[in-house]
Amino acid sequence: MNFPARAFQVVWIAWGVIWILAASWSARTRVLQRARDRLLNSVPVIGGGILLFSRTSADSQWGRLVLPVTPMLVWVGFGATVAGLLFAVWARFALGRMWSGRVTLKEEHALVERGPYGLVRHPIYTGLVLALLGTALARNTVLAWAGTLLVVAGLILKLKQEERLLEGHFGPGYAGYRSRVKGLIPFIW
């Protein structure tokens, strides 16, 4: 295995370990997402993740390169992956006990607008999308890009589910936050 592939594995695994450890100090759940909605956003995320990290023959249509291969492309992808995962971790810690892997309301749920939540309403997803794009850029296969698109579609579905829940719970407070801060891409969308 060459250095870039191992480096990508290390940063994604490190992120996963941090994520699992941080999950243990979330507040108790008060309102839980319906199983059907969970399935709706989880299937594309899991399926896309499998595609993104799958190996395929360079001779197949799925293994075909999308962009010309250069070492710079791999390093730009690696930088985007690291930056995205660090942004997601920052957002996770800023959210604190309000975090959940599912769309939920926690006991004494509070609206967080500090740190990365002052830049975008869903900074964990922003960071993950940047990391996914970086990984797809470095892998550079049709399969990796297809996987990335699937994961992003699943995250957007989950984002919309969260928006409905938060708008319903916080009402005008969330509507005001939503009017001030973009959802996924700072200053744009």
Image: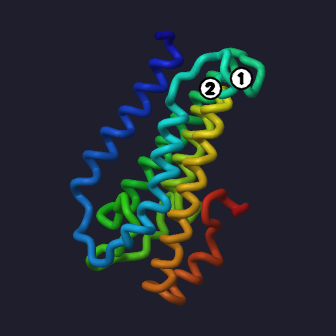
Q: Is residue 129 visible?
A: yes
Secondary structure of the residue carrying tag 1 is: loop
77 relative to 32 in the view: left or right: right
**Residue 38 rendering spot, x and y as whole percentages:** 41, 63
Q: Outermost residue toward the top? A: 2
Please tell me which residue lies in front, 29 or 40: 40
Residue lying farthest bottom? 172
Left or right: where 74 falls relative to 1: right
**Mark 1 crowdedness (10 Å alpha carbons): few <14, some 14-19, many ≥20:** some
Please tell me which residue is depicted at 53% across the width and 43% down the height of the picture. 48
Please state which of the two labelled residues, at mark 2 or mark 1, is closer to the viewer.
1
Q: Amino acid at mark 2?
A: Ala
Q: Whole-percent x and y of residue 89?
A: 42, 47
**Disc on the earlier residue, 2 or 1:** 1
Which residue corresponds to mark 2? Answer: 138
Residue at image position (57%, 32%) is 135
* Quadrant where the C terminus is found in the figure: bottom right
Mark sitting on residue 65: 1
Indicate the amino acid at tag 1: Leu
Q: Dot 2: what SS?
A: helix
Instruction: Decide if residue 76 is in sight here.
Output: no
Q: Please determine whether, in this image, residue 59 is positioned above or below residue 112.
A: above
Establish if 5 lies above or below 17: above
As displayed, is residue 185 above or below residue 140? below
Foreground residue among 86 and 65 = 65
